[in-house]
Each structure stands twice: as structure tokens, then as C-alpha cells.
Image (tube, helix red, strand yellow):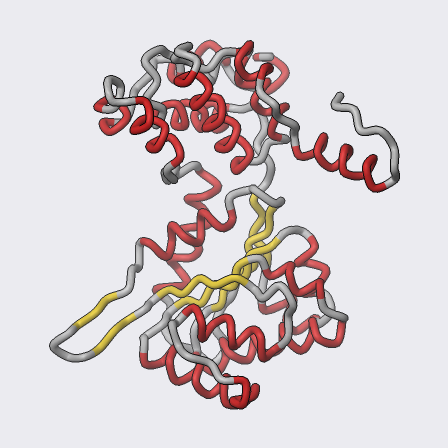
Amino acid sequence: MGGAVGYDIAEVLQLTQERSLRDKARTLLDAPVEERLLYIREDHWIGYPAAQMVLAKLEDLYAAPDVTRPENVLIVGHTNSGKSSIVREFASRHPAQNDPHAGQAELPVIVFDAPAVPTEERLYTHLLNQLGAVTRPSEGVDGKLFRVRTLLRRLGTRVLVLDEVNNLLAANPRIQQQVLTSIKELGNDLGRPIVLTGTEVALAALRLDPQVQNRFPPVFLPRWVLNRDYLQLLASLESFLPLRKESRLASEVIAPLILEMTDGLIGEMILLVRRAATEAIRTNVECITEKLLRSLDWHSPTERNRLSAALELGAPARPS
């Protein structure tokens, strides 16, 4: 394992196997079971290198001055690669501000999901709903666009994030291009950056219009591989687990097993570790072991896709 991945496994394991629990996790070691399980299900931010790189890019966009042609970005990654977590962490660092004396509210970062059935009007309706504005069917596209522009300027919005833009592929190419053009023009009109997130298929949607494609250069979130950053990620995950025994997720046995079971996707890793930690507490094992991981009713994304394809073809689906 050591020579194959190009790093000193002994050095990394020395760094990661000494468990260092977060203060909150440590205080919960003797807490009731349900309280410990509730903490495991909470979201915890882990600033791994790729996420920090994307956050730094978003902060640059946030600090940029108003311009007629603002810089934008498309964050690309597989489903469960951490895209949404990153943009929501970014938004949490720039929370809404309310000044009751001035009667003024500010919303510097807005994150909203692309409509499942995309049209230009539904895009504006989604955004107005995110802002808590009442929408009326009789308002029409132009009326909704006018209110979107007015509200975003009034709220001092500096970065607008459209999550899961690959939903656009549910529309025909003409509608896709129309929605993408409206997104680009909204950014131009406001003079502020727009951030899109999506899977690889989002790249295909943007290719429909070379001007739109050029305005949204991609930043990629790759799958995890067995290296130092990955082992440190596992150590960070373990630090949030209020388990009474050390699991050593970064060990030579468990680390590659978690990678195999999750296809190298951080969202899958978090779900798997949460489920394993929950089982460890409920069974009084109090640590995550290879045996426990293999006992879970769990299939990797690749296995789930294979099983789904088999069912669609009417073939018996047997887990590998």
C-alpha cells in the first residue's frame, strides 16, 4: 500500500492514528445514547484542501468590485462530491444582516436550487421564493425579472449561487440555452458574480452556448484517492465521533475499505461513517471496525447503479 500510492504510510498513520476528539465529541462520551446519535447526524464542516481551494476562489469573487462583465465559475463534481456543502459553508461565512434602526436587510450570498423543470420564469420564481417574496402567476417573466433585480440590489447581494444546474438537462436544448442566457445576463445586469454547481453533465449544457461556456470556467472536485489528504480527512471525520473506543479509520485495513465502499465520494464517506458510528453505539461496540463496516446493508454508488440497471432490464439483481 505504501509504495503504490507514493507516500510514507508509516509517517501518515503516526499522524492520523492518535485520536484527537473535538471538544463537543469528548463531552458527549458519557452522554445518553440518543444525544450522541443526534450529534453524529449533525453536519460538521471539514476544511480539506480541495474545499479550501474552492472557498478561496469564492471569496475572491465576493471581494471583486462591481463590473459590467463579472467573473463567474462552475463547480463540477460527481453527485455527493461535496459541492453543495462548500457553497453553503461559503454562504454561512457571509450571513444575512438586519439593521432594524435603518429598516435595512442585507443578504450578501444567496444559494438556491435550479428548478427541476427549468424555464426562465421558473428560475425567477425559485429565486423569489428563496427571498421570501410572494409570486403571482399573472406577473409574467418580465415582472418577475424586474422584482428579482430590484430585490437583489436592495439586499446588497454580492454572489448568487445556483445549485444543481444540471437540472437544466430536463428541458429541451432551446429552453436550456434560454435559461443559461438569462442567468448570464442577470449577472451582467447586477455586475456581480454568479456561481453554478453541477455534475459533469452540466458541462454539456453549457456547451450549447460558447459565450455562456466561456463565462463559467469550471473548477473540478475530483474523487478521493488513497493519499495523505484522504487519511487526514478520515482522521478529521473520526474526531467528530463520540465513540468511547478508537476506530483508527486511517488504518491500512479500514482506509482502503471505506474508499472502496464509497467510490471516493466525500458525501458517501460521511453517510457511511455516520451509519457505522450509529451501529457502533447501538450495539455497544463503541468503535468502527472492518467487521462492522462489512456487516452494514450498504452498496457503493457503482453497485447501486448496477443493481438499478439490472432491475430496469428485468434481470435478478444480486449484490456483488
Locate residue 34: give its quadrant.
Answer: top left
Identity of the residue drawn at 77% across and 34% down = 306
Position of residue 64 in the picture relative to residue 179 (left or right): left
Residue 159: image location, x then y, percent: 41, 67
Identity of the residue drawn at 62% across and 44% down = 78
Identity of the residue drawn at 59% across and 25% down = 259
Nearest the eye: 308 or 167: 308
Position of residue 212 in the picture relative to residue 104 (left or right): right
Residue lying farthest left?
A: 101
Residue 291: image location, x then y, percent: 55, 9
* Location of residue 289 with respect to 88 vertically, above or below: above
* Location of residue 306 with respect to 112 vertically, above or below: above
Nearest the eye: 284 or 233: 284
Quadrant of image for the C terminus: top right
Nearest the eye: 234 or 42: 42
Locate residue 209: give its quadrant.
Answer: bottom right
- Do we see residue 248 in this rendering? no
Position of residue 28 in the picture relative to residue 218 (left or right): left
Position of residue 266 in the picture relative to residue 319 (left or right): left
* Location of residue 84 with respect to 39 vertically, above or below: below
Residue 175: image location, x then y, percent: 71, 75
Residue 31: image location, x then y, percent: 24, 22
Quadrant of image for the N terminus: top right
